[in-house]
Amino acid sequence: MKTIKEINEKIRCGEAVIVRADEMPGIVEKDGAEKAAKKVDVVTTATFGAMCSSGAFLNFGHSDPPIKMQKVWLNEVEAYAGLAAVDAYIGASQLSETEGMSYGGAHVIEDLVNGKEVDLKATAYGTDCYPRKFVETSVSLADVNQAVMYNPRNNYQRYNAAINSSDKIIHTYMGTLLPGAKNVNFAGTGELSPLNNDPKYRTLGLGTRIFLCGAQGYIISEGTQHSPKTGFGNITVSGNLKEMDTRFLRAATMPKYGTTLYIGIGVPIPILSPEIAQATAVRNADIETSILDYSVPKLSRPQVAKVSYEELFSGTVEVDGISIKTAFMSSLRITNEILSELAHRIEDKQFYLTEPVVRLPLDSECKLMKLREKVIHVGDVMARDLKTAGKSDSIDSVSSLMIENNINQVPITDDAGKLCGIITSWDITKAIAEKKRKLAEFMTKKVVTSYADDPLDVATRKIEKHEINSTPVVDKEGRLTGIITLSDITRAYRSKGR
Amino acid sequence: MRKYRLTYPSEKLGDALLSEAILKTNAKVNILRANVDYDRGILVVSILADGKKEKEFIGFLEKHKISVEELSGKIVKDEGLCTDCGLCVGVCPTDAITVEENVIIINNDDCVQCNACVEACPFRAIRIQEF
């Protein structure tokens, strides 16, 4: 058994043996954990990836006359100012009120770290001690008193990989997912990832010194939604934004999803015992994760396959006998740069290890939100009394059907009751203009459908996204069971007071 | 091997002009990408034939009001902006983007300039550079 004090003494004397996490499996295999624990002092681990739950506290200093900021914007991105007078928290995923998704809190943070000035605007209600109601100026990192990165949920030890089995492209926080299960996107650095190398948190906890985007940062506590029992542990980290470097901190926009911050974290694991040495010998092949179908817009997404990080990193994975391309969302190039930077800093005696004051909990679980009201499903609201037509019906009969029943769309079904198209009143107008008479010629064949057990919010999102007025409801066999229109949705929400 | 973007006006969309051009000139043609919209159709093709046949082939299409332009641009990544994450790799339909030693490599010979990588990049690090 070694102590952190002894390892620090070795660092001071320039004698510490530092090894990368991916070199440990070989060392432990060759020498055994016992010998490896004597030989190796520090194992470096790192990751560089998208971490949306990131942001920074800024203290702007008082203006004269002073203001108690109630609302604050930095480059038109709102920061939270419900903290005394001139403190604010800028969150990475908040979007610009003028630029939308192309610029967000992450970009404000990146601009600040790059030494740029950002526009500060604040409003207030005015008090006897803080009479000013408005301020507009520009600030840089040099101008603010403190700029402290504080990221509530970073550095997940693993993450679910994402696939899209639907027939439409989707844009997610896991990047762009092509229809028809054409790509699998995954995140996390596997055997290099800090928490995978110390899954029992023997060396990790409050006060563990880490490399955070170029600065010396610290683990503050377990991250929000920390779920070690399921292999989804994560940490809250903090560090001085003024010491950070944009080589290890980058703003990003996930297309049509929103902004996020790529964070670089390096964690030195002190090898205090054979058990710790053994834990750092983890390989990509040992670390499993699930490929989930992100086309299902519910919290419990169906698992398509279970795979190891070794398979994910190989460039393709097999799902139901079909080979699918994988794409890594994090960066191994920058992860490697962090590993060498961290090792250099330890060798140069600029970085010493710390003992955690409180270790990360091993037993916490992540709960779901308790909802006060029952979730409305499509089946609760849809019309079941359907007017339908067949492909061979005439345009005249479909038009009369619409007029007689005061409806704007008629689903078209085949003999087995399966949905094969839809005709709207607009389709009829267009067909008349283009002198088309056969329903099969002008009906919309690629119909956006819903299931009766879809939450109403999911159907609403579909209707908004595709700019349509209704979606037919089908069962798993594709048989038509109902239809839900925009007015059904409005009525349902109105009765709930939304 | 050169790549061309063929733009069909809407009134030519129903005609089998590509087949006719192939039969007439005996040029081997590889269709790399096809998009049909309400107002036009776009085909990206590579022509595997000698200069004479290639010229005849293009001449035939142009005679039938199809605009033919050589794909002269190329996909480039901005080294300063790119983090070498692989999100562009997954969306590339022709596998023209690969990762070698943790670095993203774009192979323009295989690229059909569909713009998928440009749109998928979270760092706006990829663009089509026109010459």
Image (tube, coloured by chain):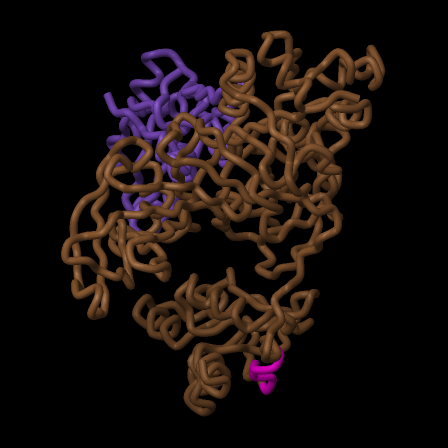
Chain colours: A brown, B purple
Q: Is residue A461 visible?
A: yes
Residue pictured at 33% horizontal, 12% vertical:
B51
Residue A351 vertical position relative to residue A147 in the rendered view, above or below:
above
The magenta stretch is A379-385
User: Where is residue A29 drawn, in percent x and y?
Assistant: 82, 15
Residue A206 screen position, x and y as percent: 60, 41
**Is A139 placed left or right of A239 in the picture?**
left
Q: Is residue A144 left or right of residue A276?
A: left
Determine which quarter of the picture holds residue B55. top left
Question: Is A436 above or below relative to A25?
Answer: below
Pinpoint residue A169: horizontal percent, then vertical percent: 50, 49
Q: Where is residue B26 drawn, in percent x and y?
A: 43, 20
Q: Is residue A354 left or right of residue A201?
A: left
Q: The C terminus of chain B lies in which quarter of the figure?
A: top left
- Residue at point 66% right, 18% down? A7
Is residue B115 visible in the rendered image? The answer is: no
In this rendering, the answer to whether A112 lies above or below A469 is: above
Q: Residue at x 21, y 54 (%)?
A: A121
Between A440 and A104, the one lying in front of the other is A104
Picture residue at 46% right of the left edge, 20% below the top: B105
Location of residue A286 by image quarter:
top right
Depth check, front residue: A220 or B125: A220
Q: Would you say residue A381 sits in the magenta stretch?
A: yes
Within the magenta stretch, is there residue B55? Answer: no
Closer to the camera in the image, A85 or A98: A85
